[in-house]
């Protein structure tokens, strides 16, 4: 089976890009189980991706500049694919509204090459409501046609699959989730938890968030307000929160800093900036509970699976599409509003002595069902059905 993946993969493993991580994890796992895998990056910052980064994957020279025309792509791209990889059995287009991919999809149809679209949540209701007018125009002009001619849509969760089917006319949808590398299960044996300095002094419950600091999308305004509620109820609640990740915009940065100040959370909330690789894992290990209060999510957020794989139980909103997984790992669900989040955190605080055991159960759940090898085998089976 020859599978060509086309998606926005960058030259470095950007911790803030879940799509980048998801593509990398899935294609290297597919190569490891014997699938012939190719990658054509549609990102203009893809130059420099090395074979060592993606072992077993045939790297086709990607875009070196931005592509703006969804109607046209040079036939030279097809000649390059044939020369470097051959004729694929199926092409997998990752993400949405990328003009180069939509134009290449049109070329695939002309050649009779079948393709699957993996939107990573870009076709969900929440994502469709962002820049709604622009998306409506894009859907009308070219995106619905691109989706219509796909042999299937690969959704990352059952919730995402239902939303795709309700919003778009699609032939078929199959569901296979995101996953993690197996080395995460043993990383705590040789990697110490991050040193939070005096911030960690006199704390009974340490909450952690790791991800892009996009206030509205990730519901971080709700989380900060919840921390304000908890602080106002009693100064004796020794609960703190640290946040890891880059700010999405300057507006997000200004909002977070001003909110921390206005709610008097300077001693309760710590901003640690973006962290990568081993350092990022050490911060997961430094929290007692991982918190993800998104208003909407693409599929299954990698950060939640990573936290559970590292033995950290999670508190999440239903909009994360992880309710069933989190509950089975004996985590908690809250609604995307400050009162519900605060109430859930206080409930966890009262049961904090059981967190280690709950973390072990979460880790075992991910170990048995959410490794990249397991997911690679599932996607291979789904491709085989379609072909």
Image: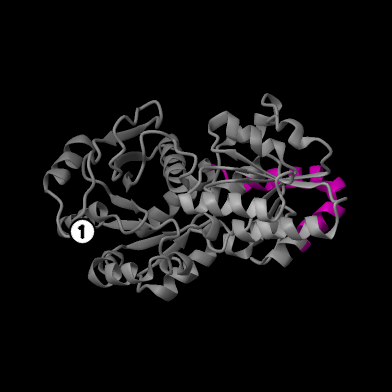
How many numbered badges does the structure rendering display?
Answer: 1
Task: Tell me if residue 9 comes above or below residue 340 in the rendering.
Answer: above
Q: Residue at x 53, y 63 (%)?
A: 296
In percent of the image, x 31 and y 59: which residue is there?
97
Specify how the rendered protein is coloured.
one colour
Q: Is residue 387 visible?
A: no
In the image, residue 164 above or below residue 350: below
Indicate whether residue 109 is drawn in magenta. no
Q: Residue at x 83, y 52 (%)?
A: 349
| Quarter of the image where the N terminus is located | top left
Image check: 267 left or right of 68? right
Indicate the quadrant where residue 225 lies.
bottom right
Q: Residues within 10 Å of mark 1 (few under 14, many from 20)?
A: many
Q: Secondary structure at mark 1?
A: loop
Q: Quadrant of the C terminus?
A: bottom left
Instruction: Please provide percent x and percent y for residue 142.
Output: 24, 66
Above or below, comparing residue 139 to residue 193 in the picture: below
Q: Nearer the viewer, residue 30 or 46?
A: 46
Tell me: 109 left or right of 327. left
**Residue 353 among those drawn in magenta:** yes
Q: Which residues are magenta?
A: 343-371
Q: Position of residue 79 (x, y in %)?
A: 13, 42
The answer to which of 116 and 199 lies nearer the viewer is 199
| Residue carrying label 1 | 70
Please say whether residue 63 is visible from this viewpoint. Answer: yes
Locate residue 21, reporting x and y percent: 46, 42
Question: For residue 52, which quarter of the picture?
Answer: top left
Secondary structure that dominates the magenta span: helix
């Amino acid at each position: 089976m020859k599978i060509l993946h086309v998606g926005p993969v960058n030259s470095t493993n950007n911790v803030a890009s879940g799509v980048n991580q998801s593509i990398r994890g899935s294609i290297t796992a597919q190569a490891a189980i014997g699938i012939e895998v190719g990658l054509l990056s549609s990102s203009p910052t893809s130059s420099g991706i090395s074979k060592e980064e993606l072992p077993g994957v045939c790297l086709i020279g990607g875009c070196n500049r931005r592509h703006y025309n969804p109607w046209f792509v040079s036939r030279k791209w097809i000649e390059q694919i044939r020369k470097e990889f051959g004729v694929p059995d199926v092409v997998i287009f990752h993400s949405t509204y990328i003009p180069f991919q939509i134009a290449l999809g049109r070329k695939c149809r002309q050649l009779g090459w079948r393709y699957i679209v993996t939107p990573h949540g870009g076709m969900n209701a929440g994502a469709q409501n962002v820049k709604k007018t622009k998306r409506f125009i894009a859907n009308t002009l070219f995106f619905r046609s691109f989706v219509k001619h796909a042999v299937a849509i690969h959704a990352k969760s059952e919730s995402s699959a239902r939303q795709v089917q309700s919003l778009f006319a699609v032939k078929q949808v199959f569901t296979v989730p995101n996953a993690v590398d197996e080395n995460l299960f043993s990383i705590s044996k040789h990697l110490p938890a991050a040193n939070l300095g005096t911030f960690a002094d006199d704390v009974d419950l340490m909450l952690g968030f790791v991800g892009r600091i996009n206030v509205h999308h990730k519901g971080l305004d709700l989380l900060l307000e919840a921390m304000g509620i908890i602080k106002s109820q009693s100064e004796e609640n020794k609960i703190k929160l640290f946040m890891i990740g880059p700010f999405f915009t300057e507006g997000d940065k200004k909002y977070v800093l001003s909110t921390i100040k206005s709610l008097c959370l300077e001693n309760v909330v710590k901003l640690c900036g973006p962290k990568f690789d081993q350092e990022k894992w050490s911060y997961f290990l430094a929290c007692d509970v991982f918190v993800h209060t998104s208003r909407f999510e693409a599929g299954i957020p990698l950060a939640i699976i990573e936290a559970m794989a590292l033995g950290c139980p999670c508190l999440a909103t239903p909009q994360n599409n992880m309710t069933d997984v989190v509950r089975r790992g004996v985590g908690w669900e809250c609604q995307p509003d400050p009162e519900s989040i605060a109430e859930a955190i206080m409930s966890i605080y009262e049961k904090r002595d059981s967190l280690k055991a709950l973390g072990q159960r979460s880790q075992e759940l991910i170990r048995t069902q959410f490794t990249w090898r397991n997911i690679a085998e599932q996607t291979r089976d789904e491709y085989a059905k379609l072909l």
